């Protein structure tokens, strides 16, 4: 049964969500730090959250099962150690930047190094579980990280306006617009994946829309992509008018729907070998 197959690979789904939150939120924090007028408090708090997620991802990585049961995805153990080392480096370098460097000139390079380590984690993840679809899985992991980490950081930023009312709206508008772009790209990527039957399952084009996994595929599209895209656009519009409470509320909704979409995407890949 599809639901049982997804449930049997919850450890890999958990890894995807935690790693996506870590890398995506850290990337938004660095963007806010270098390119916007967001407060230092927001940046530091978001980095702390990202590093906590990264540490949890590292712990979960060490507990991943060696095989994925009846899934067409075959794990390649050759990349387990490099993946875990990259995760550890992400957390360690990020913590060094946060605790020791604290805004010194070298801090910029440490931030870039931590972010690069996070991206390397995604590369090794794709190499570990790509099963002939390495590039597709890498794209999927990258956009999942950008969406779930981005919406989490955007929600935190929305809260910051409640205690810093004089903060310009530009940072939240920028992050929300980027979120709209990421989700729109996910919709396009979904169409490409479905139209080509991408993934280790090697299905015929559009077969995923009508097969035994169709319910979860449609849920991924409607709840995990279309609805968040509409809500993200509304968040941009409300942020531009400085209706920050409304924008934050919309981003709260998006945290739930994008998290659900991420879980569905990871479950469909690790359970059925479907890229969606």
Image (cartoon, helix red, strand yellow):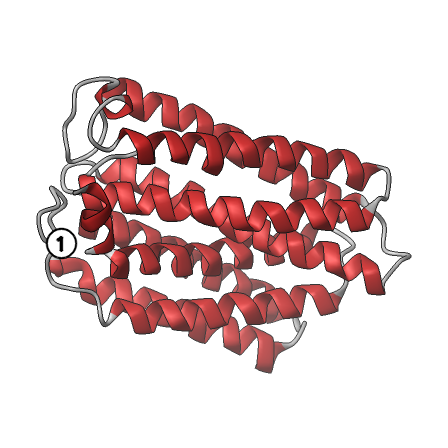
The quadrant holding residue 157 is bottom right
Residue 23 lies, with reference to residue 228, above or below; the image says: below
Q: Is residue 180 left or right of residue 235?
A: left
Q: Is residue 124 left or right of residue 232?
A: left
Residue 264 lies, with reference to residue 101, above or below; the image says: above
Q: Position of residue 261 (x, y in %)?
A: 43, 42
Q: Is residue 163 left or right of residue 115?
A: right
Residue at x 37%, y 49% (from the top left corner) = 263
Say whether residue 214 is visible: yes
Assign the N terminus to one quadrant of the image: top left
Q: Badge 1: how crowded within 10 Å, few (<14), some, or many (20+)?
A: many
Say whether residue 33 is visible: no
Assign the C terminus to one quadrant of the image: top left
Residue at x 25%, y 42% (from the top left corner) = 269
Residue 4 lies, with reference to residue 104, above or below; the image says: above
- SS for dot 1: loop
Q: Position of residue 275 (x, y in %)?
A: 28, 34
Q: Which residue is mark 1?
A: 68
Q: Position of residue 119 (x, y in %)?
A: 39, 53
Residue at x 62%, y 30% (from the top left corner) = 230
Q: Position of residue 53 (x, y in %)?
A: 46, 67
């Amino acid at each position: 049964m599809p639901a049982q197959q997804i449930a049997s690979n919850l450890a890999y789904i958990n890894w995807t969500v935690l790693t996506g939150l870590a890398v995506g939120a850290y990337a938004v924090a660095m963007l806010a730090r270098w390119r916007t007028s967001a407060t230092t408090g927001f940046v530091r708090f978001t980095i702390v959250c990202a590093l906590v997620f990264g540490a949890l991802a590292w712990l979960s990585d060490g507990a991943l099962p060696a095989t994925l049961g009846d899934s067409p995805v075959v794990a390649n153990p050759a990349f387990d150690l490099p993946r875990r080392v990259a995760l550890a480096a992400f957390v360690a370098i990020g913590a060094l930047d946060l605790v020791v460097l604290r805004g010194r000139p070298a801090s910029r390079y440490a931030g870039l190094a931590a972010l690069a380590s996070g991206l390397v984690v995604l590369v090794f993840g794709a190499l570990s579980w790509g099963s002939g679809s390495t590039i597709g899985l890498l794209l999927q992991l990258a956009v999942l990280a950008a969406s779930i980490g981005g919406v989490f950081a955007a929600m935190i930023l929305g809260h910051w306006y409640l205690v810093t009312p004089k903060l310009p709206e530009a940072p939240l508008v920028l992050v929300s617009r980027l979120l709209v772009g990421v989700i729109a790209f996910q919709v396009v990527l979904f169409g490409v994946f479905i139209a080509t039957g991408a993934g280790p399952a090697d299905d015929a084009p559009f077969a995923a829309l009508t097969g035994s996994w169709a319910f979860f595929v449609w849920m991924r599209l409607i709840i995990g992509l279309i609805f968040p895209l509409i809500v993200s656009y509304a968040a941009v519009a409300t942020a531009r008018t400085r209706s920050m409470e409304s924008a934050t509320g919309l981003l709260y909704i998006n945290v739930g729907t994008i998290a659900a979409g991420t879980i569905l995407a990871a479950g469909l890949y690790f359970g059925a070998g479907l890229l969606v």
